Amino acid sequence: KKMGLNEIRNEFLDFFQEKNHLILPSFSLVPKNDKSLLLINAGMAPLKPYFTGDSIPPNKRVATCQKCVRTGDIENVGKTDRHATFFEMLGNFSFGEYFKDEAIEWAWEFMTERLEIPRENIWVTIYFDDDEAFEIWNKKIKISKEKIIRLGKEDNFWELEVGPGGPCSEIYIDRGEEYGCGKSTCKPGCECDRYVEVWNLVFSQYDKDEYGNYNPLPNPNIDTGMGLERIAAVMEGADNIFEIGIINDLLKEVEKISGEKYGKDKKVDESIRVITDHIRAITFLVSDGVLPSNEGRGYVLRRLIRRGARHGKLLGIDGIFLYALSEKVIQLWKEEYTELAENEEKIKRIIKIEEEKFEETIDQGINILNKYIEDMENNNEKTLSGDKAFKLYDTYGFPLDLTREILEEKALKVDEKEFNIEMEEQRERARNARDGSKREAWGKDELTSRFKEFKTKFIGYTTTESNSRI
Ligand code: ATP
Ligand code: MG
Ligand code: MG
Ligand code: MG
């Protein structure tokens, strides 16, 4: 069945409205009253207080289409068929009301009856000891046991740093042998792109506290998440999530700006996909009030803009272009996300300022890095020293991941430990300069508590976004 992004989104929300869910609009990408999370990365994230019982939900059944950003996936973008840093997540939620049976039955009904996905293409995974889920899939839905894969905690246990979580069951679509790695062990959960994970059903029955205890919730919850772009790509039989509907229109705009053609060269395609992805994330982040900075979510935005700018250079784009490209994003998504049109001026202005700033140093920085690479190759060295990487960061505005990525293209590394030490020293200097006058007066306890605050801030961020290395 042919359905675009908007049709699938509407179909999903209509379906769950018919099942007595209250439809809520997407929340902002910036979490409210939640220090454990840098950016909203799942449909359930802004609903956390309803799961823990800290707030009373407006309805026990809710469905949303939520804007999400996952910086942990930044290095997958352009490389896998299925990862974006910005994407929309469809989800249905039960706050202590319905549980596994309904969640599974409705997911199945939606996939097979509304989207008309052939049942033989659908596989599922469950948490390894979740026999209850197995029974429902096998006995009620009648999926053969070979197509129900038991996986461990890494894949099928969903949790945040703290808060609600539990075992899950995921739905995969088999795209056919031609997408596979060909290994006899290839099945859902395999690294290759044959089986695409589209929907995660989380049976959230625990509330994890800050000490790592799993406290059973009195009324277990349902939290599901389906990637809109992924399911759309499956429905269209597209190769990857950048080749569908209006995302493809955006990709075409990147082709136009760069004068490059998509689909001929692997490296070019990768850069085109990175820009297509990053400009969506950038536009939505600025629209939700994030400003470029050297810390926290502002740094996520800065990295995305700088990474986008660098891929622009790789495509041979002259000068700044991202701010102009954001106009296309606004045009394409403003009907669904009206805030984009309201914030249009601000979005373009902020991206432009940040782009101009980097434009002044990016060429110089790339030249210097190329010189470092040349020296390394001549001396048969594999690792760039941390202080050189730090100089690139400090003087030329190269985020560490950008330096790392450029080096990786030449099979080289960067001494990240040393970089982080330099970074820490700089923060310390900045702090001392700021607090210089009061410094002497501090007692030991004050110092420790400030250090703790600092530590939770940073460790909190990096562990929540497990693979993002800020
Ligand atoms: P994957 O294993 O493919 O990285 P995930 O297990 O990390 O996905 P979940 O946390 O289960 O993903 O999120 C629920 C759904 O959101 C996924 O099943 C998928 O459809 C979608 N999704 C997750 N990450 C991305 C992404 N980076 N880009 C697009 N869609 C995504
Ligand atoms: Mg993932
Ligand atoms: Mg997964
Ligand atoms: Mg998953």
Image (cartoon, grey):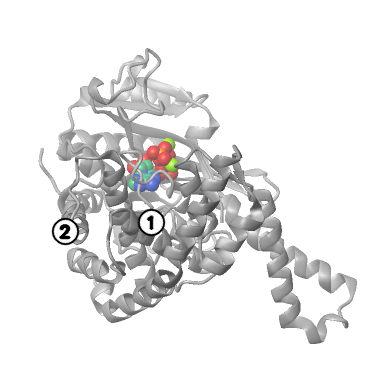
Q: Is residue 64 visible?
A: no
Q: Amino acid at mark 2?
A: Lys
Residue sitting at x 89%, y 76%:
443
Q: Residue furthest front?
A: 378
Q: SS for tag 2?
A: helix
Residue sitting at x 73%, y 69%:
428
Work out whether 419 lies above or below 414: below
Q: CA distance from mark 1 to mark 2?
A: 27 Å
Work out whether 279 lies above or below 116: below
Left or right: 92 with respect to 18?
A: right
Q: Residue furthest bottom?
A: 437
x, y percent for residue 320:
31, 69
Which residue does the numbered mark 2 point to in the structure image?
256
Left or right: 7 with respect to 106?
A: left
Q: Which mark is residue 68?
A: 1
Q: Amino acid at mark 1?
A: Cys
Q: Is residue 352 visible?
A: yes
x, y percent for residue 125:
40, 27
The one nearer the camera, 171 or 59, is 171
Residue sitting at x 56%, y 68%:
395
Q: Mark 1 CB in 8 Å range of ligand 1?
A: yes
Task: Give the number of the mark in front: 1 or 2.
Answer: 2
Tally of numbered tags: 2
* Quadrant in which the C terminus is drawn: bottom right
Work out whether 23 lies above or below 223: below
Q: SS for tag 1?
A: strand
Residue sitting at x 36%, y 64%:
282
Q: Quadrant of residue 455?
A: bottom right
Q: Quadrant of residue 192?
A: top left
Work out whether 23 lies above or below 440: above
x, y percent for residue 364:
46, 65
The one nearer the camera, 337 or 79, is 79
